[in-house]
Amino acid sequence: WWSAAHYLTDVSVDYHYAHTVVAGQTPYRDFLPEYPPLSLWVTAIPAVSLNGHAVDFQTYQVRFALEMFLLTALMAAVVVLIAARLWRETSRPYLAAVGCVVFVLAVGPLVENRFDVGVALINALVLLALVYRRLAVAALMVGVGCAFKITPIILLPLLVVLAGWNRRAVVACVLALGVAAVGFLPYLFTATAGVGHVFAYQTRRPLEIESVLGLPVVVDHLLSGARLYTAFSYHSRSLVGPHSATMTRLSAPLAILALLGVSALLWRARAALRAQPGKAALGMFALYLAFLCTDRVLSPQYLIWLIPVAVIVALDDPLLGLAAMVTAALTQLEFPVLWHHVIAFHRVDLEWLCVRNLSLFATFALAAWRLWRLGVPSPA
């Protein structure tokens, strides 16, 4: 779309880890990656050559992009299967394929420059299992997602709601957490401190400039002229200014409250969710939006996670799907197109960032409203 294919990427970081793995070093013991094991091995695959040595960076960049395109195609195929299961003998499976293309274009080149499409594929597989009413398989895939990038653990409330407050819910949670633990198992005893670093790294990150929680700080700057600064840490740009420390401290309690609120809405709508498997997409969508709107870190590639559930939601609720697509497109405009102007605090570009964050929050509010309405008993 509006920027070069390999502009402002983290592929160099992935290449460094991949090169180290191919050289024979052990993750979490010999070096400290910030992501769980499964994502590390996925990013290592493009670096392997026939002679056993790591390929050069340019070759790795092309291979990495091809791997991400393959994962994107698999994700789209799963989304089409979901649509075919939910809406047989209609045109919606074809619309699902088109929807995947549209959302990928809205997100932009991030799809080929980040491994987050792996999370999107896992989310699609979780939803596929749920529409087939295979709760154990869905729990297994949530566990795989946790071993890939931790965040899919926020889907556990949906599994509990669908299982009911009984032994099935306990089994689903144990299965998900057990599979996640298996991913870390090879390193738990030989590199305990390195595994702990994965979780400590994520909890220590400061307020990111793109986060929704950074919105009050940016608005204060726009209205009062308060001084803002950026700092580069944890592979991202953090926001330093009045109230930024306060918003950072509020992140964890706000995230807990938001996820508890969505969980309560899911429980209220449990009858509809169990009767209509396709509504699980709305539940997943709301949980992820609650996390994105309250986390101190909101990297633009996180929007990739939403693609499969957003497509299914859009087929069932076009207004909510349109809100998600607009938010994705605004995110691409903010990063990478206007990024250098944003971190230089150009007023117009900061206003675009505010519009994106408001759009994301509005999408979350609409999803929560849809869940609330789903819990209202039908007059029939």
Image: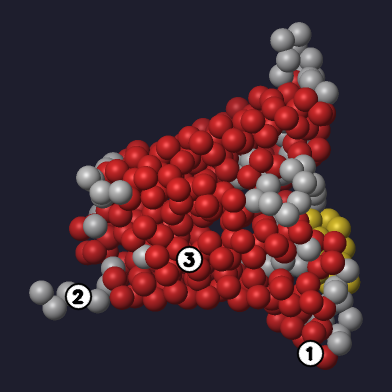
Using the numbered discs, state the Cα–Cα distance from disc 3 to disc 2 in whole angstroms: 26 Å
Q: Amino acid at mark 2?
A: Pro
Q: Amino acid at mark 1?
A: Leu
Residue 193 in sight from this viewpoint: no
Residue 54 in sight from this viewpoint: yes
Picture coordinates of residue 102, whole percent (x, y): 52, 52
Q: Eyeballing the image, is 335 above or below 265? A: above
Picture coordinates of residue 164, whole percent (x, y): 26, 57
Picture coordinates of residue 242, whole percent (x, y): 82, 81
- The front one of 146 and 304 is 304
Identify the residue position indicated by label 1 in the image.
223
Q: Eyeballing the image, is 303 above or below 4? A: below
- The front one of 375 and 168 is 375
Residue at 61% from the left image edge and 36% from the top image edge: 68
Single out the mark in the foreground, 3 or 2: 3
Identify the residue position indicated by label 3 in the image.
322
* Residue positioned most to the top: 51
Residue 251 as seen in the image, left or right of residue 12: left
Single out the mark in the foreground, 1 or 2: 1
Helix or strand or loop: what does disc 3 sit on? helix
Residue at 80% from the left image edge and 61% from the top image edge: 339
Q: Upstream in the sequence, badge 3 or badge 1?
A: 1
Single out the mark in the foreground, 3 or 1: 3
Judge the density around disc 1: few (<14), some (14-19), many (≥20) Cα neighbours within 10 Å: few
Screen quadrant of the C terminus: bottom left
The label shown at residue 377 is 2
Whether tag 3 and tag 1 are in contact, CB under 8 A, the answer is: no
Judge the density around disc 2: few (<14), some (14-19), many (≥20) Cα neighbours within 10 Å: few
Helix or strand or loop: what does disc 1 sit on? helix
